[in-house]
Amino acid sequence: MVALLLGAVGFLPLFGGPGYEHALASGLIVPSAAAIATAIDAARRGSPSPLASAARGVIAGLAYATLALVTALLHAARIGVCEVTSALVYFALTAGAGAVMGGIWGAVAGELAGALVARGRVRRPRLVASTLALAAPIAGVVVSVYRFRSSAMIFAFDPFVGYFSGTLYDTVIDAGASLLSYRLGSLATLAAALLGASVLERDDARPFGLVLDLRSEATRARAALAFAAGAASVAVTLSGATLGHYSTTASIVRDLGAEKHGPRCDVVYPSTTREQEASLLLKDCEEQLAAVEERLGAKGPARVRAFFFRDDADKKRLMGAAHTYIAKPWREEVYLQLGGYPHPVLGHELAHVVAGSFGRGAFRIAGDLGGYLPNPGLIEGIAVFASPDEEDLTDEQWARAMMQIGILPPMQRIFSLGFLGDASAKSYTLAGAFISWMGERWGIQVVRAWYGGEDVAALTGKTWPELDAAFREHLATVELPAEAESFARAKFSRPGIFGRRCPHLVDATRREADVCRDTQRYDEAIRLYDEVLAKDALDHASRHWRAQTMRRHGERELGRRELEALASREDVPRTWRDRAEEALADADFIDGELEDARRRYESLASRSLDEDSARTFEVKTLATADPPAREAIQALLLGDAKRGPDMFLAGTALGRWPAATPDGRSPLASYLVGRNLVQRGFYEKGAATLDDALAGPLPTPRLVRETLRQRAVAACALDDRAALARVRGVIEGPDDPFRGASGGRRASTLRTIARCLR
């Protein structure tokens, strides 16, 4: 059964070959198999003593673990190996150790079943032994589910399975030192079991069929060691929250250390957070909760608790998700990293909690089987609709672009487990676009009813093929900017995790390379990027950063040639071609070839759909022609041949810039200073400086738009309703600077203003 099950599992994407997924599948199968086989043998008295049963369990665990590993290696020979050494070590610490634990537990179960058989209590030793053998692995899963439901944590350490990361979208799987300390506890448990078995003898007349043998000094010494090992195992278990094996709500609150409470929001945050920032966290939660409820037409829970962690590493340590934001509607809680005001993802996660008011089952979500089989498209789609991202295109515009380039899947697939088959950006966007369309056509009350378990065909009077066709007809009426299709092809062409080659190893190695690049260990960074490309030749991020690092800090001409090749390849996504072109322009700028840099920047700005990128290209273009601006913009955005951008150098240069102009002022310098002040929480000074920039004239409409957006953020933070009204008046007036631009950024700015004025 082990060979058949794991052999079949290996044909699934990511499960073929040693690695996290294979170890997880093995941990669910192998320990139970070892436990059952050992328990049946011990119950039939196939071994002469408890110690022999325990030894048999260890051997069975090792044998079945080896068999599982052989299936992984056979699949690796079929599809190729990502990495061997670390995968084997990980397997040994998870499913391998779990298999031995399963064998030991099987010996215990078998001895108990054998005693019951000998005393005439049961007549079916195989059934009793198998049931007892499965009891502990099932209990471990039950404990993990209970912790998931009753606390913030989504990860799990289990004596048999090993480690479950808890999230699909965090591709870098690293249990860290916590796995080592957990398995030290397992080792103590194994030592206690083996030493304890060595001082036990069978006596079927006793209640459990066993009796201690302490007649000799040797047995008493082994008993003492068994007690010490057992005590060590218990100590590790009791210290689990400290060692990172599990978390509780109380332990997370203690670790973060500070709380604030508002009319409906309770925020938990690091005690090192500045008071103004903490107050804005609470304000943001209250504002976004009200906005989400208005959008969904539903009242959420009386109180919501929002946890803000220091950074992604802190969030992973305490609750399990590093780069993935999480909400638990049944607990009325959300879990995020600290971010600027307004938080870019808080509204999305609060939407999950509000949707829980009309969700199903114990988890208050959308899904079949009473909500226990989730519908991820409906769960995420309603959150995207309730709190749209601040993107340059709306979700419906992106969906229209996907339809144009032929990558729009049937909508029924998005609203099923097929949602997980595509990259998250694609699935989330399409789900949000479809929910938005349904809300406009049938009303948000129909969407809520669908979320709550009613059949969408009965609610709309249309089958899924008819809904799909109607949605496509609607998308055909959505207007698109000229460059939308090429950017959509780049944005949504990347496959999901199940369609990638060695995603865990590739992403972890690239992240290490990025750290080396940022810490000026350029040779090591280039070596690591080469490792990534050897595993995944389509990892355009690594190819780009390798070439850029070489262009600025290594073999400069070779780096230039590679960037030029990357920028000209039609099979490379548009965004990476443009980034390569920008890297060439930056290098020209730093080398003093300003005319070449200007031409590249102008070309990029003219065709870029991304508002932030295009605005940056415009600022760099201005720097090539304006000597007073050049020093400040280079320090702020480019750096020099030896170092990257530096805020201190940029600040000093920005201070000198206006004095070098004929009238002693520069609206562009005011914009750059004001924007950075707002982003760093200096809202009063930032607002005044942005007002000076708006007095103008600012050189491009994109700069005017971003200045207005940042001014609205500052006004929200300061509760300056008059300033908010002024900004809204400009945007909705005859001189609207957003006219002619894609609609996403304008809509998000107006939503921010409305949320703050509510």
Image (cartoon, grey):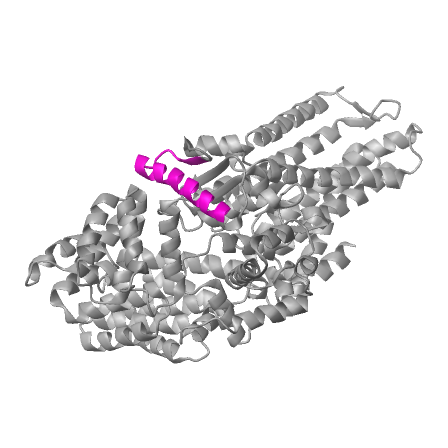
Can residue 19 be seen in this snapshot?
no
Magenta stretch encompasses residue 648: no
State the residue lying farthest toward the left.
662
- Residue at position x 40%, y 73% in the image: 481
Can residue 471 be seen in this snapshot?
yes
391, above or below 538, in the image: above
State the residue lying farthest toward the top.
215
Corner quadrant of residue 729 = bottom left
State the residue lying farthest toward the front.
734
Number of labels in the image equals: 0
Residue 493: horizontal and vertical position, in percent? 51, 70
Residue 397: horizontal and vertical position, in percent? 47, 68
- Residue at position x 36%, y 76% in the image: 562
In terms of depth relative to the viewer, which is nearer, 677 or 54?
A: 677
Q: Give the prevailing secondary structure in the magenta stretch.
A: helix
Residue 40: horizontal and vertical position, in percent? 84, 41
Left or right, residue 71 beside residue 170:
right
- Residue at position x 88%, y 30% in the image: 116
Q: In which quarter of the image is the C terminus?
A: top left
In terms of depth relative to the viewer, which is nearer, 321 or 377?
A: 377
- Residue at position x 23%, y 48% in the image: 687
In terms of depth relative to the viewer, which is nearer, 309 or 264?
A: 264
Residue range highlighted in magenta: 266-294
97, above or below 737, in the image: above
Residue 491: horizontal and vertical position, in percent? 46, 68
